[in-house]
Amino acid sequence: MAWLVPLLFLAVGLLVFCKKRASGGSVSGPKSYPVVGALFSFWKNRGRLLEWYTEMLARAPTQTIALGRLGGGRTVVTANPANVEHILRTKFENYPKGEPFTGILHDLLGTGIFNVDGDGWKLQRRVASYQFNTRSLRSFIVEVVEEVTERLLPLLGDASRRGGWLDLQDVLQRFAFDNICKVALGIDPACLDASLPVSEFARAFDLATGLCAQRAAAPVSLVWKVKRVLNVGSERRLARAAEVVHEFALDVIRRRRKEIAAGSESSKKDLLSRLMVLANIPQFTAAMGAGHEAYRSEVFLRDTIVSFILAGRDTTSAALTWFFWLLSSHPHVEHAIRLETTRLVIARPDGGGGQKQDPSVFSYEELQRMNYLHAAISESMRLYPPVPFDSKHALANDVLPDGTFVGKGARVTYHPYAMGRMKTIWGPDCLEFKPERWLDEKGLYTPRNPFKFPVFQGGVRVCLGKEMAFIQMKYIAASVVSNFKLRPVDSNRTPKCISCLTARMVGGFPVFVQTIDDNT
């Protein structure tokens, strides 16, 4: 069946050539690329799609472009903050994710919160909001402290003593996976334990997300849809990987149900336990409406927790990988972070014996006072957002603020990766890594307009886990920078960013680990 894919591409090319048409409709704003030109350019730039979109958007008069699609219609791509606000807030109801996008992820995420619209999304968001209040955030720090002090720092210390290298991207993914499993499932997979192999679930999860990303990037969705029907190639591998992920989640759900029924898990505060308890409260089920029974089902629970594992594992690990790479080439930023954390430790009251607390352990209040570190992480995500682009689906005809016509059924994509590289948004130094751009004259962190910096989305669907993500990233960064220097194995290599649902570093991030004492 190896001949099937090229044959399909040839058929599509002939169809497009025979029907050759531009992007359709009069457009006042963006530069339009007809179907044939868009497909040819896509294929030519398939190894650098993020950069290709950035270049096209930078050249466009209003940082908005339109790409032709097979069968008519268009994909509108924008890096214009006014357009982003229009899509995410002003006309939110007109721009759901839509079936064309949710279909790409359905085999893995089903109807989980990140892949559903309407009442299903509202319900899951309402339940999840309980997991992200201040009390829960303080409790979350306990989980992070344990993972950092008992596993991450010893792992890095061992690498330093051996004088060898490790793949930091892999380490951070393992760390984030352990953390999110504790928060979402109430279990500890211990993936960061170097003596244990990577779990089958983690391997399957990686494969499934990568193959879903291939679907999203495909210029012609017909190819992967035909392969799925025939159950061949990448679609066969995706089906097997998704089955492993789902069986893992279902096994956890079934065991938790037995524990709750036996009364032994009533004190659990993880997301899964909250969902199960709430689904049995009459007032809550009444608020769900007529279809509330569906929200008690194993499939609903499975899809919800798989979605949260995706968000909690891949986004923070991707953000931190790029953050530590940027630090390695900006030692003055690394020094400023170390100085900030040291001052906080020095300012602590001692315990009466002249000894300060562990300098690798930080309180919630101390993390909140790390303004420069917060700025450095934000600046890193400006240049390397964990989710480089996000797409919506237009329910009805609309006109964006820059005058771009959006036809019913069009895909509308906003592009945080490109936005971080727009001079019109960030100025002529937009390609420079400058945490100072996030600080006021007193050195305090100043948030930017979320529609100029839509890393956590914005408007109605703004990320509930934003504060939890910052707490985790700041804690890891502060603890690691206070104890170690991480330096790339190949200092001459400029890593490549590839979107695999999240912005991963191609080939990982091999680093040498040195203790601070070794460099003083």
Image (spheres, helix red, strand yellow):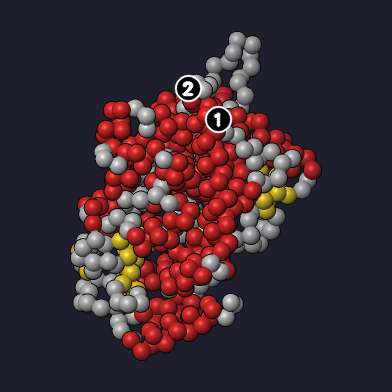
Residue 417 position within the rendered picture, expressed as x and y whole percent measured from the top left: 43, 59
Q: Residue 177 carries which label?
A: none
**What element does badge 1 sit on?**
helix
Considering the image in quadrants, where does the C terminus appear? top right
Q: In this view, does 301 lie above or below 218?
A: above
Q: Earlier in the sequence, mark 2 or mark 1?
A: 1
Q: Which residue is drawn at 23% across and 68% down?
A: 407
Q: Residue at x 47, y 27 (%)?
A: 269
Q: In front: 520, or 61?
A: 61
Which amino acid type is marked by label 1?
A: Glu
**What element does badge 2 sit on?**
loop
Residue 44 position within the rendered picture, expressed as x and y whole percent measured from the top left: 50, 78
Q: Which residue is drawn at 58% across and 38% down?
A: 178
Q: In this view, does 235 lie above or below 13?
A: above
Mark 2 nearby-residue class (10 Å; few <14, some 14–19, many ≥20)? few
Q: Distance of mark 2 from mark 1, alpha carbons?
A: 19 Å
Considering the image in quadrants, where does the N terminus appear? bottom right
| Residue 271 visible in the snapshot | yes
Which amino acid type is marked by label 2?
A: Ser
Residue 516 position within the rendered picture, expressed as x and y whole percent measured from the top left: 69, 38
Q: In front: 482, or 395?
A: 395
Q: Which mark is residue 143?
A: 1
Residue 404 position within the rendered picture, expressed as x and y whole percent measured from the top left: 23, 68
View extreme (bottom): residue: 18
Mark 1 nearby-residue class (10 Å; few <14, some 14–19, many ≥20)? some
| Residue 503 visible in the snapshot | no
View extreme (top): residue: 352
Q: Quadrant of residue 13?
A: bottom left
Q: Which residue is drawn at 36% across and 89% down?
A: 18
Q: Name the residue under label 2.
A: 266
